[in-house]
Image: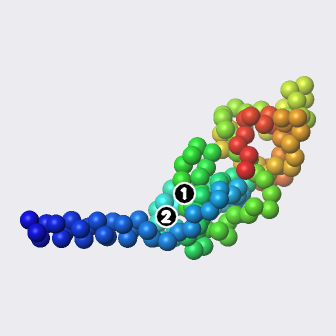
């Protein structure tokens, strides 16, 4: 029984040590992907599994940092890790929250849809300005449009 207590105590100490691996928790910060494509990983390093690939302007909320790796949260609340050289906070970006979202030529439903509308969920864009609940955006191809603000997640 004494041996079991020491083993249990050793496991508890190891568990606490493993949970205290240093990563810096920070005040949540908005970030945007600033490269054509970026891999989101399960952990902070290239040796961790690639879970998802995202495109330019995908927004994230930064939760923590470990070395050059950032722990981030997406529009769905999912948590990933990505390398800091893939992101910027120099501008705001947004992602569409639902399928078949209309993009318009101006700020309102009285404006026609752009030729490439509608777009689907996870379409990421750079925010140019917000005007009366409408967001003026530009996509990675340089095409501009307007979208109703409640239909996008802006960071």
Label 1 residue SS = strand
Q: State the residue at coordinates (52%, 61%).
A: 41
Q: Which of 10/147 is in front? A: 10
Residue at the spot 29% in from the left edge and 65% down from the top edge: 12
State the residue in front, 148 or 38. Answer: 148
Q: Is residue 31 left or right of residue 16?
A: right
Q: Is residue 77 above or below residue 46?
A: above
Work out how far the residue at label 2 is from the one at label 1, CA to CA, in angstroms: 7 Å
Residue 141 screen position, x and y as percent: 80, 53
Quick one: label 2 or label 1, which is nearer the N terminus? 2
Q: Are marks 2 and 1 in contact (CB under 8 Å)?
A: no
Instruction: Check the image and name the residue furthest to the left.
Output: 1
Q: Residue at x 83, y 35 (%)?
A: 133
Q: Nearer the viewer, residue 12 or 44?
A: 12
Give the structural element (helix, strand or loop) at label 2. Answer: loop
Q: Dot 1: few (<14), some (14–19), or many (≥20) neighbours within 10 Å?
A: many
Vertical side of 123 occupied by 20: above or below: below
Residue 36 appears in the rendering: no
Identify the residue position indicated by label 2 in the image: 43
Mark 1 — residue?
80
Neighbor class of circle 2 (other Cα within 10 Å; few <14, some 14-19, many 20+) is some
Residue 16 in sight here: yes
Locate residue 62: give its quadrant: bottom right
> x, y (%) of residue 88?
74, 63
| Quadrant for the N terminus in the image | bottom left
Q: Which mark is residue 117?
A: none
Q: Position of residue 79 (x, y in %)?
A: 54, 53
């Amino acid at each position: 029984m004494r041996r079991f207590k020491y083993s249990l105590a050793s496991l508890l100490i190891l568990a606490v040590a493993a949970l205290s691996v240093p990563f810096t928790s920070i005040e949540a910060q908005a970030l945007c992907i600033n490269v054509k494509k970026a891999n989101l990983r399960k952990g902070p390093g290239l040796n961790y599994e690639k879970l998802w690939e995202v495109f330019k302007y995908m927004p994230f909320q930064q939760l923590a940092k470990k070395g050059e790796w950032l722990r981030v949260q997406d529009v769905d609340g999912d948590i990933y890790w990505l390398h800091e050289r893939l992101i910027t906070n120099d501008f705001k970006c947004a992602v569409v929250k639902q399928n078949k979202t209309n993009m318009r030529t101006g700020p309102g439903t009285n404006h026609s849809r752009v030729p490439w509308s509608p777009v689907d969920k996870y379409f990421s864009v750079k925010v140019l300005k917000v005007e009366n609940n409408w967001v003026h955006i530009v996509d990675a191809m340089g095409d501009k449009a307007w979208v109703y603000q409640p239909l996008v997640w802006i960071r």
